[in-house]
Image (cartoon, rainbow, N blue to C red):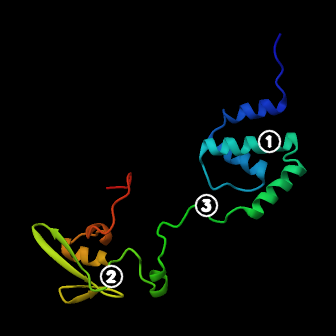
Amino acid sequence: MAKKIDPLQRELLSLDEMSVGELVEKFRGVFGKDTRTRNRPYLVRKIAWRLQERAEGGLSDRAKARVAELAATAPLRHVAPRVKPTEEAESDGRDPRLPKPGTVIRREYNGKEYAVTVHETDFEYRGKRYASLSKIAKDITGTHWNGWLFFNLATRKRGAAA
């Protein structure tokens, strides 16, 4: 005896057979607006969710109230700041990763040693003032460099492009 498939089940199964273009059209029909994505798995999930929501009635009033309750106390930021400013950095506006003014940063490159003096708001290299370490690194190497990496004040994170 053949098992009957209800219309919702049939419609959900048909999503797997649709092309991305067809899914985009279906999305427009189901949500009443265009989508900016052409990510097939995402479109299938979103459309299936909406079809089931329509058939089953969506969230209960109790669930909606609980969501609103949780949202009111949810933190606005989920990721902590990458650099926690120190009180000193907050007071003078300097990047807390920078060495103190007057510090000389040294770097050996192609057999030569290069020295840069850190000032309050800029850097000095060969008697000339620069706004960033990256500009100094470019003058030394002739190519674009991240100044923090060039002068070993930061390390590249794992998995970052080389």
Q: Position of residue 40 (x, y in %)?
A: 61, 42
Quarter residue 140 falls in: bottom left
- Nearest the viewer among 22 and 41 is 41
Rendered residue at 84%/31% (across/down) = 7
Mark 1 or mark 3, whichever is nearer to me: 3
In the rendered structure, the answer to whether residue 84 lies left or right of residue 98 reads: right
How many numbered callouts?
Answer: 3
| Residue 47 versus residue 142 in the image, above or below | above
Q: Amino acid at mark 1?
A: Leu
Mark 3 or mark 2, whichever is nearer to me: 2
What residue is disc 1 on?
51
**Earlier sequence position, callout 1 versus callout 3:** 1
Q: Classify the position of the N terminus by image quarter.
A: top right
Q: Position of residue 127 (x, y in %)?
A: 19, 89
Farthest-out residue, right: 61
- Nearest the viewer among 90 and 2 is 90
Label ID, residue 100: 2
Q: Amino acid at mark 2?
A: Lys
Callout 1 secondary element? helix
Label ID, residue 78: 3
In the rendered structure, the answer to whether residue 86 lies left or right of residue 69 reads: left
Quarter residue 110 falls in: bottom left
| Residue 142 versus residue 69 in the image, above or below | below
- Nearest the viewer among 92 and 32 is 92
**Earlier sequence position, callout 3 versus callout 2:** 3
Mark 2 or mark 1, whichever is nearer to me: 2
> How far apart are the alpha carbons under marks 1 and 3?
31 Å
Q: Position of residue 131 (x, y in %)?
A: 33, 84
